[in-house]
Every structure is written in structure tokens, then in C-alpha cells.
Image (cartoon, rainbow, N blue to C red):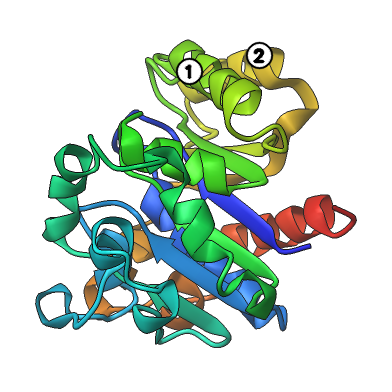
Amino acid sequence: MTNIISIVNQKGGVGKTTTTLNLATYVGKKRKKVLFIDLDPQGNGTSGFGVDKGHIENSTYDVMVNDLPISEAIIESSAKNVDICPTNINLAGAEIELVSAMSREQILKNAIKEVEDQYDYIFIDCPPSLGILTINALTASNGLIVPIQGEYYALEGLTQLIETINIVRKKLNPDIDIIGVVLTMFDRRTQLTRQVKEEVENYFGDKVFKTQIPRNVRLAEAPSHGLAIADYDPNSKGGRAYESLAKEVINRTKNR
């Protein structure tokens, strides 16, 4: 079974795109065939793979709104074994344009059916909201990864996220489950970060990945070069952390 995994948290600035992009890249380096679907209208994942958002022929928007077969939007990325379904700011209008669409929560799920057998993993980068795009991602997925920053208010909004996941599980997708929770922007030197880690572990238990993603300048620099950290500076702290996280994700999903 193809692992279709959404990286989701409606709170912005928690490292969703960085996590999705780097997970996809490192899983690809483990000889897995990977598709990265950019479902965030900001398109940072698209540009992070070196794709010019201003010169995309077809995009996730066309798949979601114009019934374009997803195979016609998919292109090769700069990373080994990783394809990408890119996006741009046009996707921001999808929330409004899909209001009256038939089975609007199922659009992405139905689109993915065309290509899912071609991939071992499909990673979906979700927008920082719980609107129709994120609902589509949750409906299409059989697993979720939740990034949580190691900072104050880290757990803010998570109750709403869990409620949304439970509603989707009940009404749209009974197969969805949280694969794991990853702490990002982690600085183990501070007492606050250690307290947040303890709170997250109390809340999610063994769902919390052992790997934490540190604050790292090289991680921040990599997207400006159109590269994932694995191809920019794999020996950096950020690179080693995401490689470790990819191994955990593969281990947790290999028997699904």
C-alpha cells in the first residue's frame, strides 16, 4: 500500500514545508519512489525544490479546480526519486471556487488514485489552516505527521486539529491515523524547550518521534538555493536530523 502522508498543523511557522520537503528528499534517497504534493498556496515547497512558481504550466490548482489529471501536473524535482506536483498563488482561490463543487472533500483523493501505484510514498504539504484544502489532504491520506515547534504556545490549536481529524475519520476517511509528532526548532539548551517536549510527550505519548529538528542556519539557507538540506548540506545538524527522522518514518510505515 502506498503511504500517503499529510504534514499538518493549522498553526503557521511550525516547519511544515521544511519537514515535508526534507522528508520527501531523504525518503527518496532510501530508494523509495516519492511524490511531493504542494497544497499550500504559498508554494514554498515548490520553490524549495528549485521550481519557478511563476512559470508552472500545470499546478495543484488545475488538479483541484479544473479537473486536470494529476499526472499532467507532476514534474521531476531536483531530488533523487522525488517527483513534485507544484503550486502557486492561484491555489489561494480554490477555497472559494470549491464551495459548490460536488464531493469537494474527495477531489484530491480521487486525483491521487490515478498515480498512487507509481509511488511508495506521497507527502502532502498542507496550508496553515483547517479549510477545504487541508480537509482534502486529510481525506486523501492514510497517515499524518504533526510538526510542533519547541516554543511557547506550541500546543495552541492542537485540540481543534485533533477534533478535525476525528471528524474526518468518522465521516470521510476511517483509515487516517497520526503516524507521529515531530518537535521542530528545537533548542535543548533552554528550559522552555524541555518543558514543551515534556508537554508534547504527555499529550501524544509514543507518537512523538525520537528525532527532534534543531534550529539550524543551513536548514534556513537551503530553500534559497532550490535544494533540500540533503543536497545542500547533509552533514549539518539539520541534515542529520531529517535523515534520522526519515528512517523513523520508514520504520513506522513499512508494515502498513
Residue shown at 50% from the left, 25% from the top? 193
* Residue pictured at 12% horizontal, 82% vertical: 55
Instruction: Identify whether 130 is placed above or below 250.
Output: above
Q: Which mark is residue 203?
A: 2
Which secondary structure lies at badge 2?
Answer: helix
Q: Residue at x 52, y 80 (%)?
A: 82
Q: Is residue 232 visible?
A: yes
In this rendered view, identify the residue nearer to me: 31 or 212: 31
Nearest the eye: 252 or 123: 123
Q: Identity of the amino acid at label 2?
A: Tyr
Say whether residue 173 is left or right of residue 163.
right
First in sequence, mark 2 or 1: give its number.
Answer: 1
**Badge 1 amino acid:** Leu
Determine whether, in the image, residue 211 is placed left or right of residue 233.
right
Looking at the image, which residue sits at the far left?
Answer: 54
Is the C-beta separation of discs 2 and 1 under 8 Å?
A: yes
Mark 1 = which residue?
A: 158
